[in-house]
Image (tube, coloured by chain):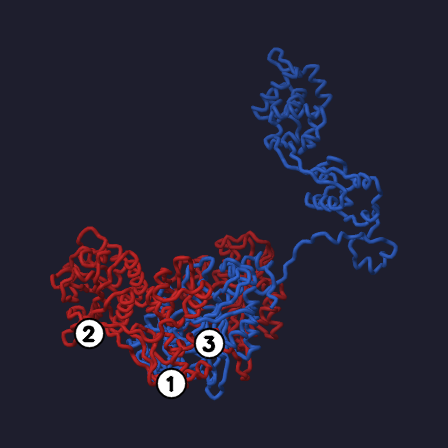
Chain colours: A red, B blue
Amino acid sequence: MPTININRKVFEKLVGKKLPLEKLKDRISYLGTDLEEITKDEIIVEVFPNRPDMLSEQGFARAFSSFIGIKTGLRTYKVNKSNHKMIIDSSVKTVRPFTACCIIKNLNFNEEKIREIIQIQEKLHLTYGRKRKKVAIGIYPSEKIKYPITFKALPPEKIKFQPLEYPIELTGKQILEKHPKGKEYAHLLEGKTKYPLFVDANNQVLSMPPIINSENVGKITEKTKDVFIEVSGFDFKACKICLNILATTLADMGGKIYSMEINFGNKKETTPNLNPSKMKLNLDYINKRLGLNLKEKEAKKLLERMGYKYLNKTVLIPAYRADILHQVDLAEDIAIAYGYENFNEEIPNISTIGQEDPFEIFKRKISNLLVGLNLLEVSTYHILSEENHNQKMNYDADVITLDNPASTEYSVLRSWIVPSLMKILSENTHNEYPQNIFEISEVFIHNKKTETNVEEATRLAVVLCDKDANFTRIKQVFDALMRSLKLSYKIEETKHPSFIPGRVARISIKGKKVAYIGEVHPEVISNFDIKMPVACFELNLSDLFKFI
Amino acid sequence: MGDIIETLHPLERKVIPFLKDNITLTELCKKTKLKEVEVMRALQWLENKNILKIKKDIQEVITINPEYTKTTEKGLPEKRLLLALKKSSELNEIKKNADLDKNEFNISLGLLKRKKAISFENKRIMITKEGERLLKENFPEEDLFKKLPLNYSELNEKEKKYYNEFKNRHIILTSLRKDRYITLTDLGKKLIKKDIGKDLIDSLSPQIIKTKSWQNKKFRKYDVKLEVPKIYPGKRHFVNQATDYARKIWTEMGFEEMKGTLVNTSFWNFDALFTAQDHPVRELQDTFYIKNPKKGKLPAKKLVERIKKTHENGWKTKSTGWEYKWDEEEAKKNVLRTHTTVLSAQTLSKVNKSELPKKFFALGKCFRNETLDWSHLFEFNQTEGIVVDKDANFKHLLGYLREFFKKMGYPKIRFRPGYFPYTEPSVEGDVYDPVRKQWVELFGAGIFRPEVVVPLLGEDIPVLAWGPGFDRALTAYYNIKDLRNLYENDQKQLREIKLWLK
């Protein structure tokens, strides 16, 4: 989750009140933001992903100020008309079809404001923008632009401009190959024959979204007063909300919002639209969900403390809120305003019967029996390397592999447990012997009949590793287990490349093959750098359970 | 003194007769014919009883140069040459009898000459009077060989002379070795003069019981404070000891266990939980996807249709939905479950509404695509509970949480707002860490969104849900700082770790 760094002085000025430290810490947590750190000059908080509007000093202070009751209710922002236009060329349709934009005047940039604006842009890109995939933001000094602006797409070799923080002009293709931002975001334009471009009336390139602005028309400096902002992407609604967040934030910085007309050819729309959206509130529903008994007046007050307006059983939702899909979202905000710490906790008197899964009980009984045989239970990962699972075992199982393993060390889902236990033994050669261990866990096998085309079975593996670990000893363990379960079994010699020929067997119960048992081949033992004999069995408990 | 004598172990009894000041461990081994560990054990016990002090010493150890092993069997080369000379004067014959190689032969010849044991007369080798004397004396220095290996300190004056000679001739080798020697305490000096007796019963045997021979004998007293060799019991893995305890808490609170597979389709793991298809948690760097089989099957069409519509426009849930186009193929992708909440979704789709209220819990492994380090595991245990109850509300959720965590051993917890895509309101739970004197995040909770419940259950019934990460909660009890140690399976750790006593 994203963290933002807040200048404490700016914050306190925006909030309109200075709280004592403990109270400040407490209130930040109860507003629903994780307080990471607080110093004399700075507050670092983690903002939940459903509140992109709080990813700036201004947005956070706005919410906080309402929450502590200083400036409550719906904030209104004046939107002036700029008479400037954005023309959407049809060529962007398949590349990056939408943009929402506006102009903010009177910002009078300084170093602090530039830092703030870079922070909010970065954080919005990362979260709400899904790393620029969903929406990307561009901010430009308005005075360098000759309106109207056109949003169009051109073949990359026909694009040529000097990208931000780069000494020379590059083509669209070169930007993706050479510019650091180009390399970072190249995948977003992968496979496109045309790249999107903002161009002004003088044919100056503003930017190539979602990659990079131009050096000439796309750089904010301390001399900048007015800015042009655009948000481009695939989801027009998301573009508009993101623009609303930016416009209101910059207005809170002291800017004046000027709308622009977006011309799609066949239709026109003016952005930003900061009119609040409306949602009916069913107070009974809210009260029932929260276990409260709020009167309309109380609910109204609580809503106002979360920045809403309540009128005629309807909630007016600020245009920068991206997270209100359903009344339950309002219920949560009411709960936050009410204070999570103020709820009277209760446990309802309903009677239900607790029940462990019977197979879990069975597994525990088996474990306890094995513990009684002086075996040590281990717990290993379900994921291991193909080398440990197959090659070192002299085995060639058709394993299920991960699409995106974090490392080759952990890249396949095991189809048997013994390799994991061999790995444990190989990591314990410095420890005292005997090392007699067992594990009950899941294995994964291809099976077209299941929902996932993967069958999972729970198996028990017992591995004895000692100077006198042999077939007799491991069979004794197996036999003791079967006698305790009052199950009879059939054992027949078989072949298995991980075991010594003539010392490996298949075990079946009631005609069902349930286990392998044998002495591990010395070549396999050496592959794991173990210097002691190993004997083991692996038993399918899922099958066994059916016979109980 | 009598007491001490009665406690003497058979090993101590074997060592005591040979004890004297400055005797070394090596010497004691030789004399008692015991193994070094046995003598050492006896000495340590005696030291504990204040009979003696063990001291460390560096000794020069003398051994035979392996090139001269023949010497031990057949005698010194010069002796062999002299004997051969006595027998014959024919050079080839001499060489054969002496069994010396060319080099040894020449050295021995030179040596005998220097000792004036032989002389050359008319190119013939003659044995002198001195030579005859040597033969008669039979080379006494040879005896030194038979005693090797020896410590230099054990040599007498004469032997030291031989030692120097042998050392110059490289017949012997010397090396430094740490040895131990003892000095007797006053008590020890008294003890070795005492009769320590022999007729004590050491181990009680069936024979002694049968014959009642113990009746007129004394038992040797044991030193009950002695350390004993360690033995190790079989044990459950410590994480599993704790998960069993969590199962007990859940069942005590009236929860029924849910079970399911670790591999699931994205449909169950994400879509059924109203997690938007472009949500970052579904990205490759967060979730493990399966390469083969890449996709699974979707459940009944009716349910798929409901989920699709809920995502796209809210369906009957009165939500706006995510307002995008829901992709069925994305939902088919197989993943390793990222949370046990997948079981809650599956349970809600199956639960019989006439049996409500019902409570369910799950406990099991979940997976996140993390690189292993001290604070991250890609595979970890999670536990989760849901309460499906028409009358359930937020106050109940907090009540259940308080009770559950009290039983888990966290008397002091606090709730603050949180965020999860599938709950609203959402809660983050902190537990108070009395050592660090601060709140530590431990669990998430909330009431499932109608967008989750309505498509699965067919009705907007409150479902309270909470799920603490389980492994992190264990580390404090077991005093584990590095999460990787939970599944390292170091045999020593597993043998020595404290039992789960809750």
Asked if badge 3 and badge 2 are on a common chain, one would say no
Amino acid beneath label 2: Thr
Nearest to the observer: residue B144 or residue B416: B416
Question: Label 3 to label 2, Cα distance in Å?
Answer: 43 Å
Which of the two residues, A332 or A523, is positioned nearer the viewer here? A332
Classify mark 3: residues with Cα within 10 Å, few (<14), some (14-19) or many (20+). many
Helix, strand or loop under label 3: strand
In the picture, the quarter occupied by the N terminus of chain A is bottom left
Does A127 appear above or below B360? above
Q: Nearer the viewer, mark 1 or mark 3?
A: 1
Chain at tag 3: B
Quick one: label 1, few (<14), some, or many (20+) residues within 10 Å? few
Task: Identify the image quadrant of the C terminus of chain A.
Answer: bottom right
- Mark 3, mark 2: which one is toward the viewer? 2
Q: Which residue is mark 3?
A: B465
The residue that label 1 is drawn on is A282
Q: Residues within 10 Å of mark 2 (few under 14, many from 20)?
A: some
Horizontal side of residue A85 vs B353, given as left or right:
left
A25, above or below B11, in the image: below
| Quadrant housing residue A378 | bottom right
Real-space Cα distance between discs 1 and 3?
Answer: 23 Å
Q: Residue A381, can we see it?
A: yes
Q: Which residue is mark 2?
A: A270
Occupied quadrant, residue B366: bottom left
Q: Position of residue A420 (x, y in %)?
A: 49, 61
Q: Is residue B428 above or below residue B72?
A: below
**Left or right of B155, for residue B235:** left
